[in-house]
Amino acid sequence: MMPACLSDDLILCPEREDISAEFTRLLTAAQEGGATIAECLLIARQLKRGDDQSWHREWKKLARANRHRAEAAFAEGHMASAQRNWLRAMNYYAAAAMPLEAADERRWVAVLATQECARRYLSARTPPGEVVTIPWLDDHSLQGYFLPAPSGRGPAPTVICIGEPGHRKEEFLFKLAPHARERGFAMLALDLFGDQRDDYLDVLLRRRDLESAIPAVMDYLETRSDVDVGRIAIVADGWGSSFVARAVLQEPRLAAAVCDGGLWDLHERAFFASRFAMSDVSIVPVPHAPLMASSAECPVLITLGEDGWLKADRARQIVQTSRLGSSEVMLKVFTAGETGAAQAHADNPSLANEYIFDWLESRLSSPLRI
């Protein structure tokens, strides 16, 4: 019999939307090695309704168990098992941190444990990955995980993976790295936090030039001999990533981009224009010009779930009426019938990422450009 906190359709604690969404994320992470379904269900049965601390406590305990298994496997030379367990431990620590306030010291301890598991995972890979620091602002640098292409020989096509301003990069190591590796890509997983705590998000959200991070990343990648500078793409994971769309306009070195294309910016412009009866949407006070209002120099893929925040018909209309210049903008809508239809494809990210990386493969398959 299912516990009170777990319904028949595996929606955990309906009164806590954040907990239910995180549990869904953990279940879907099992498809890529970031969790196991059995462990997720075990924790669900152990959670106590009304005990706000049980979520943090149980996921932290499970993270420690996976971490210990990883260390034991590594000591015995079993690199594959060590990597798998570090990835799961990393994700479970992140789950433990999720409901805690940014100022809660336990959250920062969990984040540090997540990062340590990520570093251990990188060291066990072949070829090994590395933690990199990328200068950005005068008082703040970016931090990333660079995963070389599996061949380890010569300059390789490379994919930059970055999320929303409040998103941490560790999830990309199981969510996106397998797709990159299978196609012979190197990958750089990034977030905007650098080495700062989660409350640094308030500082980031006050900035109006987040897109300036991407040229800084491109400058760094140009210094690496194992990166084909003519075949660098970017994937903006999640929905609120219009800063990446703005960066695409400013960064001619990108060969392809997967992002929201400024779609949400355009939607806001149209909303305000209709609200205030403005006939010229170009004067609507949305902070930045969206990608599709200009001509980008690289092809752009926008993926959308039909059950997400922005309805598919509205998205198609915006794309169709806003596509200008020579930019190649493609919209892919995932339907409920095929899954991947939830906001940010949360119900089946694997399906969406297969499509995304196949699209990237077709655009990065050309030889090195001089």
Image (cartoon, rainbow, N blue to C red):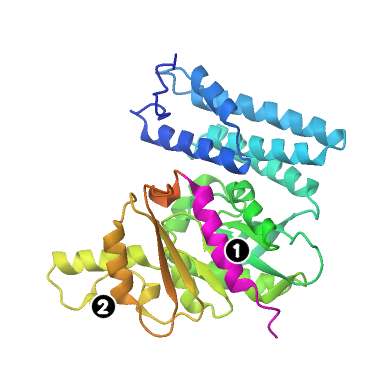
Residue marked by disc 2: 282
**Which residue is found at the position 46% from the left and 67% from the top?**
301
- Closest to the observer: 238 or 142? 238
Specify the farthest residue to the top: 1
Instruction: Give residue 85's position: percent from left, percent from top.
Output: 70, 35
Local secondary structure at mark 2: helix
Residue marked by disc 1: 160
- Closest to the observer: 355 or 173? 355
357 in the magenta segment: yes
Residue 339 located left or right of residue 86: left
Is residue 209 visible in the rendered image? The answer is no
Give the extent of the magenta segment: 348-370
177 in the magenta segment: no
Instruction: Give residue 14's position: percent from left, percent from top.
Output: 35, 28
**Looking at the image, residue 144 lies above or below residue 291:** above
Category of crowding for the residue at label 1, using alpha-carbon neighbours closer than 10 angstroms: few (below 14), some (14–19), many (at least 20): many
**Which residue is found at the position 58% from the left and 26% from the top?**
38
Local secondary structure at mark 1: strand
